[in-house]
Image (cartoon, rainbow, N blue to C red):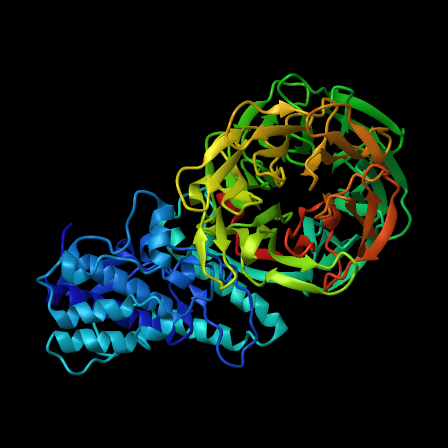
């Protein structure tokens, strides 16, 4: 509401600095300081609100532990975040001092230091610390106060105040005071109890079991303000009262936790580098045992106890073919297996529901009796719904999941499987697991990675500020909630095609990935900013600029041969994906196509005039001019992973369906159009050598990935090398994006490393569900 008088502004921000100093003293960084998080009460007392994005700073000698807010993730409010925070680098107490300077600038001038027509323009200004000098905006401000602002807003952290106490002291001196004391300051920060709890938990971080303490602290910081905002309404979850334990963690992916009927253990699927297990995890100690080990070609998921706790139902996927397997809960050989079946859920100890793909390509619901060994269709797919699963409702009825196989996007509830269902969640969101509350009154679901409570009347986020929470499962009594949380690092590496050394193009950047390399050492890559994927371009010296607005939710950047443009994919409002091109020099991006396959790198023609991409249902290969125009279809019979040859005359692509499909494999098609030709049986990623004489393909062999090659026009495949990636190859690496460095001829690959945690929230009141 306009500028404050200089002395009043200094007094307010002095107290803010002291509140930050109290938090910094126990290693807590605010990360989201802004005017709306500062309250000035009666008598001028200042309260710093909402430490919801607070981060535990690592102290010397302590073991780095990732908290539930993901250290390094770009979170915060664009006009007030520090340059290093906007770039996803390490956030320190100095970052809060920068934010304090941005607040002081605004209180003195009535204008934001960093502003612009779009969030991206604001971020660009923040990264460069590019703001109008305060002396020019408000020439009446005393020079000594201008100097305080300029020191806070220094681009380099080392040039800012050493501590918040030092900042508070300078502000106090400006007011005519030469002493300041944390004890005497009328500032409301954390309560002493919370500060002591923070300190005690931090001291336990060096122990492995202390992962439980830091997780509980993180949830407390995230949800402490949440409870007050939502209120403690009847029949609504109160996460402000919850605690959380990290019950089990592992490299790789954990999926689909499920409680035993007794609530004493959980089963969870684990997959890593081509290996797959179903693990039973003790709900008290976190100790594990292997119930089922998959064969090298098998991926296991959706383990579930039978109602009597004696058996497990497990989904098994081999080369795209799904089946359901029943095994003893104590381990041992399968007692039953059902092919062309998935999405299983027990009805009773003898029967279960499952889904099966029909000739139409949709999926219908079936029930299966173990005693009679008989399957019965109970609900057909229709023009509007393909069913991907169903779960019985406590007290009667069902929730039905609709949408693509393995990726449901809507929820329906029906009293009987033959009844007309009622929509509880409209299409357009990705559902990563759903479970009924014991009351049957509500559901808990992971919607786009966030926990949501769903009823017939409303969908309410449970912990809005926490994302990447998958596969929720409520305990039989409804007082505990298990979820999986993953942390994935996507390093961009250059790999010698002859099996020699590898090197980092972009490594260790949190929340990044899906990048490509261009001329002069440039790297374009994706990083999450404020929960949305944003593309950045980094040069050889490490200087980088944003390429896209966070609202575009962009991914899969591909630098043009000349280096002046970047093609990429952007997710639009209806869940579809657009192909766009942006100039490195700036300006509005151009949309070239819609309905594009969401995890594909567009591939440039050698002259930079055209792009090839995959789109449609079924997926096909298309070509479009980089200047715009109507896309041209190249492969009427399907195709994926297109790559333009270095000579410009051919486009390679894969058809990846199922082993029984004679079309599955490697293909090429003339770029100008013509008859496609099948050149191999493997459907994995391919890329051309820089001279266009060789076509390379990734193939998996256990924990390793091999590079195979064929001469263009001859198409006789031979193994070239086993690739050195510096660590075991991640699951499905052979299907992840692959390009070639135009200058070095090296393979440019996204090396993925995933850490998964099985979290259990305690203190849940079933009556609120």
Question: Is residue 172 left or right of 668 when viewed as pictured?
Answer: left
Which residue is depicted at the point 18% across and 83% down? Answer: 179
Which residue is depicted at the point 23% across and 80% down? Answer: 181
> Which percent across, then down, holds residue 562?
54, 45
User: Which residue is at the front of the view, 141 or 245?
Assistant: 141
Determine the residue located farthest toward the left in the rendered image. 140
Quick check: 155 above or below 432?
below
Question: Is residue 524 left or right of 351 when viewed as pictured?
Answer: left
Question: Is residue 29 left or right of 565 when viewed as pictured?
Answer: left
Quick check: 358 above or below 193?
above
Which residue is depicted at the point 91% across and 48% down? Answer: 333
Determine if residue 247 is in view.
yes
Residue 66: image quadrant is bottom right
> Which percent across, then down, holds residue 706?
81, 53
Determine if residue 330 is in view.
no
> Which percent across, then down, holds residue 227?
40, 52
Quick check: 176 above or below 129?
below
User: Which residue is at the front of the view, 676 or 714?
Assistant: 714
The number of numbered discs placed on residues in the rendered structure image is 0
> Which percent across, then down, holds residue 471?
62, 46
């Amino acid at each position: 509401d306009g500028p404050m008088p200089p002395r009043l502004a200094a007094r307010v921000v002095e107290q803010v600095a002291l509140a930050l100093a109290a938090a910094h003293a126990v290693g807590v960084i605010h990360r989201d300081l802004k005017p709306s998080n500062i309250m000035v009460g009666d008598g001028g007392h200042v309260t710093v609100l909402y430490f919801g994005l607070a981060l535990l700073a690592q102290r010397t000698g302590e073991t780095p532990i990732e908290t539930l807010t993901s250290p390094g993730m770009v979170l915060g409010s664009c006009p007030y975040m520090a340059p290093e925070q906007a770039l996803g680098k390490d956030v320190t107490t100095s970052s809060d001092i920068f934010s304090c300077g941005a607040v002081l600038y605004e209180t003195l001038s009535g204008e934001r230091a960093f502003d612009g027509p779009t969030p991206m323009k604001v971020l660009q200004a923040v990264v460069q610390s590019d703001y109008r000098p305060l002396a020019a905006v408000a020439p009446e401000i005393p020079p000594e106060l201008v100097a305080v602002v300029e020191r806070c807003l220094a681009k380099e952290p080392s040039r800012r105040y050493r501590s918040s106490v030092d900042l508070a002291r300078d502000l106090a001196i400006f007011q005519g005071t030469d002493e300041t004391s944390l004890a005497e300051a009328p500032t409301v920060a954390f309560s002493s109890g919370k500060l002591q709890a923070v300190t005690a938990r931090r001291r336990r971080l060096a122990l492995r079991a202390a992962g439980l303490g830091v997780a509980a602290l993180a949830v407390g910081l995230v949800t402490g303000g949440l409870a007050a905002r939502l209120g403690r309404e009847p029949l609504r979850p109160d996460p402000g009262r919850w605690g959380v334990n990290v019950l089990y963690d592992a490299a790789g992916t954990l999926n689909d936790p499920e409680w035993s009927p007794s609530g004493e253990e959980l089963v969870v699927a684990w997959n890593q580098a081509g290996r797959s297990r179903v693990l039973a995890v003790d709900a008290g100690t976190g100790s594990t045992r292997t119930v089922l080990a998959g064969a090298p070609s098998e991926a296991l998921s959706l383990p579930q106890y039978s109602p009597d706790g004696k058996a497990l139902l497990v989904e098994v996927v081999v080369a795209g073919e799904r089946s359901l397997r029943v095994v003893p809960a104590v381990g041992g050989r399968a007692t039953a297996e059902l092919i062309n079946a998935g999405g299983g859920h027990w009805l009773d100890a003898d029967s279960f529901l499952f889904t099966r793909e029909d000739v139409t390509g949709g999926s219908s619901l079936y029930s299966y009796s173990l005693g009679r060994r008989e399957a019965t269709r109970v609900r057909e797919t229709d023009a509007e719904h393909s069913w991907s699963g169903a779960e019985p409702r406590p007290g009667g009825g069902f929730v039905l999941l609709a949408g693509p196989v393995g990726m449901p996007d809507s929820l329906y509830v029906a009293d009987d499987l033959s009844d007309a269902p009622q929509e509880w969640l409209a299409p357009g969101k990705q559902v990563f697991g759903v479970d009924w509350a014991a009351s049957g009154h509500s559901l808990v679901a992971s919607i786009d990675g966030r926990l949501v409570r769903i009823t017939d009347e409303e969908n309410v986020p449970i912990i809005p500020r926490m994302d990447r929470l998958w596969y929720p499962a409520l305990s039989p009594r409804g007082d505990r909630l298990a979820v999986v949380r993953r942390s994935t690092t996507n390093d961009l590496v250059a790999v010698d095609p002859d099996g020699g050394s590898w090197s980092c193009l972009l490594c260790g950047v949190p929340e990044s990935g899906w990048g490509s390399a261009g001329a002069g050492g440039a790297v374009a890559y994706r990083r999450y900013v404020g929960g949305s994927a944003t593309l950045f371009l980094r040069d050889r010296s490490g200087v980088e600029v944003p390429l896209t607005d966070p609202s575009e939710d962009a991914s899969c950047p591909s630098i043009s041969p000349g280096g002046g443009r970047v093609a990429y994919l952007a997710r639009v409002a209806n869940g579809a994906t657009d192909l766009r091109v942006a100039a490195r020099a700036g300006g509005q991006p151009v949309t070239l196509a819609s309905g594009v396959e969401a995890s594909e790198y567009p591939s440039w023609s050698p002259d930079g005039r055209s792009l090839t991409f995959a789109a449609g249902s079924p997926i096909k290969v298309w070509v479009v001019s980089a200047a715009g125009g109507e896309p041209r279809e190249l492969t009427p019979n399907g195709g994926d992973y297109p790559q333009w040859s270095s000579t410009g005359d051919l486009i390679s692509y894969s058809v990846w369906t199922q082993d029984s499909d004679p079309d599955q494999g490697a293909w090429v098609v003339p770029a100008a159009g013509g008859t496609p030709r099948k050149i191999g049986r493997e459907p994995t990623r391919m890329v051309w050598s820089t001279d266009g004489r060789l076509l390379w393909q990734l193939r998996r062999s256990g924990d390793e990935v091999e590079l195979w090659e064929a001469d263009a026009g001859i198409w006789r495949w031979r193994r070239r090398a086993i690739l050195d990636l510096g660590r075991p190859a991640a699951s499905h690496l052979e299907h992840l994006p692959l390009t070639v460095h135009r200058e070095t001829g090296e393979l440019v690959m996204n090396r993925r490393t995933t850490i998964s945690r099985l979290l259990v929230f305690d203190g849940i009141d079933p009556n609120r569900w």
